[in-house]
Image: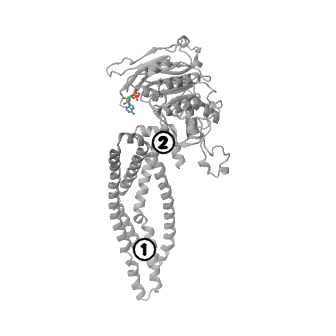
Amino acid sequence: MTKYYMERYLENQTFYKIQSQSIIDNPDQRIVDDLSSFTGTALSFSLTLFNAAVDLISFSNILFGIYPPLFVVLLIYSIGGTAISVFLGRGLVTLNFLQEKKEADFRYGLVRVRENSESIAFYGGEGNEMQLLLQRFRSAFENLTQLLIASRNLEFFTSGYRYLIQILPAAVVAPMYFSGKIEFGVINQSVSAFNHILGDFSLIVYQFQAISAFSAVIDRLGEFDDILDRSSSKGVSDPSEEIRVVYHSVRSSPVLESNGSMPKDVHQKLLDIENLTLQTPSKATLVRDLSLAINEKDHLLVMGPSGSGKTSLLRAMAGLWSTGRGTITFYVKDGEYPLPSISSDGNPPEVSTVHYDMHEELERTINRNSRGIFFLPQRPYMVLGTLRQQLLYPTWAEDAIANLESPKASGLLPFLMPVPVSGNVSKKLAKPTTDDLIQVLENVRLGYILSRIGSLDSTCEWSSVLSLGEQQRLAFARLLLSKPKLVLLDESTSALDEANEAHLYQQIRAAGITYISVGHRNTIKDYHNRILHISATDPDSTQQNWHIDLVNYDIDLVNRDTV
Ligand SMILES: Nc1ncnc2c1ncn2[C@@H]1O[C@H](COP(=O)(O)OP(=O)(O)OP(=O)(O)O)[C@@H](O)[C@H]1O
């Protein structure tokens, strides 16, 4: 179940939607704790129910044989007890639900301190952190207090319920013994049978606290499950109200010109943006009616004031931003970047039936890296692991057990075998060797890191050990290894000095990678052919709020009708 939920959580960028739109709290806790208690409690409840059923059948006969009215009284008593315990414990489900959430919030607060330790230490924000954490802890503690009070009240009733009736079987059966109707041993027999049946009928009363905790777990998992389902089945929305991201296979179905003829340079085109209007979720327009095309080696720089929507434009291209209108088409050369060998449902896709140019949510699940399109986000992301794993991310995976042939040989359960990385699909792109990795580190001027840490297989807390500029250079090293056709750089050199910045741009240009950069510095203009200026929008105007300037423009590219 853990693997099943993790797969759905990571599919269709659901993790991103959940986090960016704050849809539900603490999905991680639901995957770890709730799944664990769900499976554990479900198993123990099943066994308890089975036991109770066997017990009831065995002892009902005995009790019924001794004195039938006792059995009826017991039934009425337990039904009444169950009703009262449900009434007394009705708040427990909500309290248990909140307890899980509040404890997870508190734990997440502590994780954030760990992750942002340097920033907090620089700010000297320990006092504030303590306050914020105490607030979360207090909230969990107050809820626990209410939970304990509600449990105590229920426990008073349960104990009374359990002991009040103990005298009944002896009191009813003893006169029968004195009148000589039954033997002495039958008194004990009836008390024992009575207690067994009482326990069976009182399952809900005795287990109420566990049942309410179980019910809270089911609520949390159900909520999570609904979100995951909704995310995977989405796609029947009005296309005129959403940005469409389309992957077009060039060889299999080339785009026809409006007059029906085949365009001469279609194989050169990498990206087409048509009438794109970007809006925030609150419907404020960021970019109005943008149309442009990008050909190979046509490097575009996107500039504009802070908050004008530059990053959002890249998000839209990545399929992470759908509010607005328009179409973004990526042209992928057929065969050059074959489809992943594993589709989202875990089955190999039938290549002949996949149309690249259709707009479906499923399309986004197919890793963009496999199509030769790469994004470098504003904040470099360092994975947990070795330097080798950093460099191979996200195109290849390096796992100690990945090369084992069968689950049996590794002693692993089959579902724990490493899953193939969906980016690792290009047959042309062999996994880099150790020498390649060392060379690429040299190329981005990070060779000295290797001598500092010893080997490619050393593990560190990379995001704290490497400076921001070093992390940005490492991100470029990944890029040079993956050799995508098109890369979108979101202020990816913002922490670098000009010399290093120039060096990195030269490297990716030499590698034949076409790039679209977002940046503020004038120095990076030199490495681009065109500049897209986005200005702040006037809500009352319907005018375009962008224009394109040509810089260092190659006449060859102009001829290809890219402006
Ligand atoms: N999830 C969101 N919900 C609502 N508004 C958002 C969301 N994400 C971004 N915005 C808003 O959209 C606008 C554009 O944001 P974006 O990050 O694209 O700006 P930017 O041009 O890249 O800015 P900067 O140069 O400062 O990085 C901002 O005003 C931002 O507050």
Q: Choose top left, top right, bottom left or bottom right for residue 146.
A: bottom left
The kind of residue on which mark 2 rests is: Asp
Residue 98, x across and y down, in percent? 37, 52
Residue 260, x across and y down, in percent? 56, 14
Residue 175, x across and y down, in percent? 39, 85
Can you say whether 67 is above or below 217 in the image?
below
For the residue carrying disc 2, how many other residues have a C-alpha within 10 Å: few (<14), some (14-19), or many (20+)?
some
- Which comes sooner in the sequence, label 2 or label 1? 1
The kind of residue on which mark 1 rests is: Phe
Q: Choose top left, top right, bottom left or bottom right for residue 116.
A: top left
Residue 289, x across and y down, in percent? 42, 20
Mark 1 secondary-structure assignment: helix
- Tell whether label 1 touches label 2 (CB within 8 Å): no
Q: Which residue is mark 1?
A: 71
Can you say whether 460 is above or below 445 in the image?
below
Q: Choose top left, top right, bottom left or bottom right for residue 422.
A: top right
Instruction: Specify the color scheme.
Output: one colour
**In the image, is the residue at mark 2 within 8 Å of ligand 1 by its beta carbon?**
no
Tell me how far mark 2 sits from mark 1, CA to CA. Answer: 48 Å
Q: Where ligand 1 lies, by quadrant?
A: top left
For the residue carrying disc 1, how many other residues have a C-alpha within 10 Å: few (<14), some (14-19), or many (20+)?
many
Residue 275 appears anywhere in the view: no
Mark 2 secondary-structure assignment: helix
Q: Foreground: 176 or 192?
A: 192
For the point 54% across and 10% down, which residue is it?
555
Q: Foreground: 303 or 45?
A: 303
For the point 43% across and 76% down, which residue is it?
68
**In the image, is the residue at mark 1 within 8 Å of ligand 1 by its beta carbon?**
no
Q: Nearer the viewer, mark 2 or mark 1?
A: 2
Residue 114 appears anywhere in the view: yes
For the point 59% across and 14% down, which residue is it?
264
Q: Which residue is mark 2?
A: 229
